[in-house]
Image (spheres, rainbow, N blue to C red):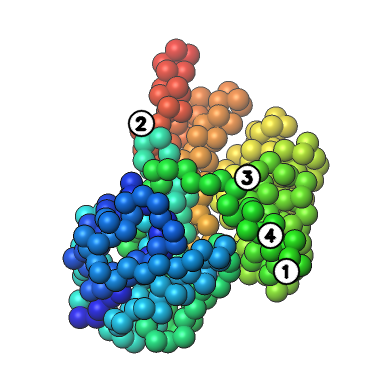
Amino acid sequence: MVTISLCMIVKNEESVLGRILAQMKEIADEIIIVDTGSADKTKEIARQYTDKIYDYAWRQDFAATRNFACSKATMDYWMWLDADDVITENEQQKLLKLKKLLNTSADVVMMRYLTGFDENGDVTFSCYRERLFKNHSGFLWEGRVHEAVTPRGNILYVPIAIEHRKINGGDPNRNLNIYQEMLLAGEALAPRHRYYYGRELFTHNQFSEAADYFTSVIDDPTAWIENRIEACLLLARCRERLGQTSQRLEALAKSFFFCAPRAEICCEIGRLLMEHGNYSAAIFWYHAAFDQKPSQTNHGFIETDSYDFLPAVQLCVCFDRLDNREQAIFWHQEAKKRKPNSPIIKYNDDYFSRTG
């Protein structure tokens, strides 16, 4: 059985730290906590699970902090988690089984990361993330913000899911401020960080500037293909918010240079066509979305609803607008299979009941 060092960086996490440490105490052979300046009971809670607690002065650099934490690992593998992550009992059992079956031929273990949820707790946003690394193999975090480790060697994908469940919102300006400090210092942003800076700008409603950064990523042949594809989607959403309707389709179509149309892209094209009353054409694109399965190995973000629930709901609407009640009800039932408790489903149930 392999051994695992859990490496975490924390600050003021008293509301969630005990939750994840309790879930990991039977899995991790070593727990390493690096505190960057907590003023609450974070370290007191950590001491209930480990004596390997280190102070580290915060330098506006997540990669440096994580590398410090991981440098303390002594087991076969090190694993990272955030304080507000959750591992359900079922996933804990999968992790314990993985420890028994895993041998040190694997350099990196990829696991699912569930980061978005709807009102019923169903997953809406996810990706595969690098999670376990063979120790003493030169793996390092990169990036002052939106940090990551580049997977290499023998990469193993396992169907283990870790949920990111925030309780407190945190500082919504933190990442944006770090990027802007980098730019003010004259630091050039690598393509990956231009993409993430664009996302931060988008979140802060700075759509014109975000569009410029997304465009720079799309046009950069050195950028990771997944970032280029996702930049096309986000560029289209920037164009929408800027009222640049004619440029939305152009932004979405640029993604076709990098891959076959993804479900997320298909749904955006379908929505655009619906807005213009072209329901027959929208049906084509929503069918294309519904017929896809999300990739488990491309590491890109997955908007889960785009692969089943959303296209089914929109196909229901499109067929209803075309007075094809039979197909409208069929697609309503398909959507209902996916999310029977969704408010949208309840509304459509009532609609079909009222309209006979």
Assign a secondary structure to mark 2: loop
Q: Which mark is residue 187?
A: 1
State the CA–CA distance, disc 2 to disc 3: 29 Å
Q: Which mark is residue 181?
A: 4
Amino acid bearing label 4: Glu
Q: Relative to 67, is 206 on the left or the right?
A: right
Assign a secondary structure to mark 1: loop
Q: Quadrant of the N terminus?
A: bottom left
Marks 2/3 in contact by CB < 8 Å: the verdict is no
Closer to the camera, 75 or 110? Answer: 75
Q: Where residue 257 sits in the image (x, y, percent)?
A: 71, 64
Closer to the camera, 332 or 227? Answer: 227
203 up-or-down from 276: above or below: below
| Residue 76 is at least partly visible in this image | yes
Q: Where residue 294 sits in the image (x, y, percent)?
A: 48, 57
Task: Residue at 78%, 54% (x, y): give it.
Answer: 212
Amino acid bearing label 1: Glu
Task: Residue at 47%, 50% (x, y): give it.
Answer: 125
Sequence-earlier tag: 2 or 1: 1
